[in-house]
Image (cartoon, rainbow, N blue to C red):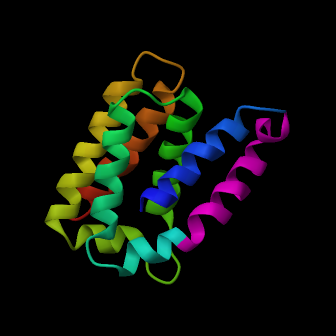
Amino acid sequence: LNSILSLCEVSGSFWSKGSYFDDTEAQQLYLAKLMGPVAVLLRYRKGMLKQFLETVSKRVAAQGLSETVVEIYMKAILMILKSKDPVLMTIIIQRSDDLQKVLLSVAKSIETIVSGGPLAHLGGKLQHHVNTICSSNQ
């Protein structure tokens, strides 16, 4: 898990250099290739999704990360939450009260950290998506 997250952080340094990643389609394609295999692990390894979410939250809260890395983390979480191959990730989350609590906590924490900054919109989008997932189960 730490290796995966380190890849995200290294990617952030590349992301902020050059004009390639100014293209949002290129960003999405890059994240899809990076996070695709990770989503399978997070889906099928018991406890891995929870550990991923908690670790990302801790790393973002440590505030030693560049804005670009925080952006990558938020987009990666959103991409994983929207993952649907072969089973919707939302169904897995909705079946677990523990995962829902962790996800709500992580989204709130990240939204609070980025509020008032240039990533506030993305933080709000993450929080809204998480609220939608968790409220659909009730």
> Residue 56: horizontal and vertical position, in percent?
38, 47
Instruction: Locate residue 124 relative to residue 16 in the image: left or right.
Output: left
Q: Give the range drawn in magenta.
A: 19-37
> Residue 109: horizontal and vertical position, in percent?
28, 35
The quarter of the picture where the N terminus appears is bottom left
Picture quadrant where residue 35 is located: bottom right
Answer yes or no: is residue 39 visible.
yes
Instruction: Locate residue 2 relative to residue 57 in the image: left or right.
Output: right
Picture quadrant where residue 49 is located: bottom left
* Furthest-right residue in this view: 19
Judging depth in this view, the residue of 62 and 40 nearest the camera is: 62
Answer yes or no: is residue 138 visible.
no
Judging depth in this view, the residue of 128 and 43 nearest the camera is: 43
Q: Within the magenta stretch, is there residue 22?
A: yes
> Residue 90: horizontal and vertical position, in percent?
36, 67
Which residue is located at x 59 percent, y 33 percent? 68
In the rendered view, tell whether residue 68 sits above or below residue 51.
above
Which residue is located at x 25 percent, y 68 percent? 94
In the rendered view, tell whether residue 37 sits above or below residue 82.
below
Instruction: Locate residue 3 relative to residue 102 in the image: left or right.
Output: right
> Residue 13: horizontal and vertical position, in percent?
66, 36
The quarter of the picture where the C terminus appears is bottom left
Q: Within the magenta stretch, is there residue 50?
A: no
Which residue is located at x 17 percent, y 54 percent? 101
Which residue is located at x 84 percent, y 41 percent? 20
In the rendered view, tell whether residue 59 sits above or below residue 132.
above
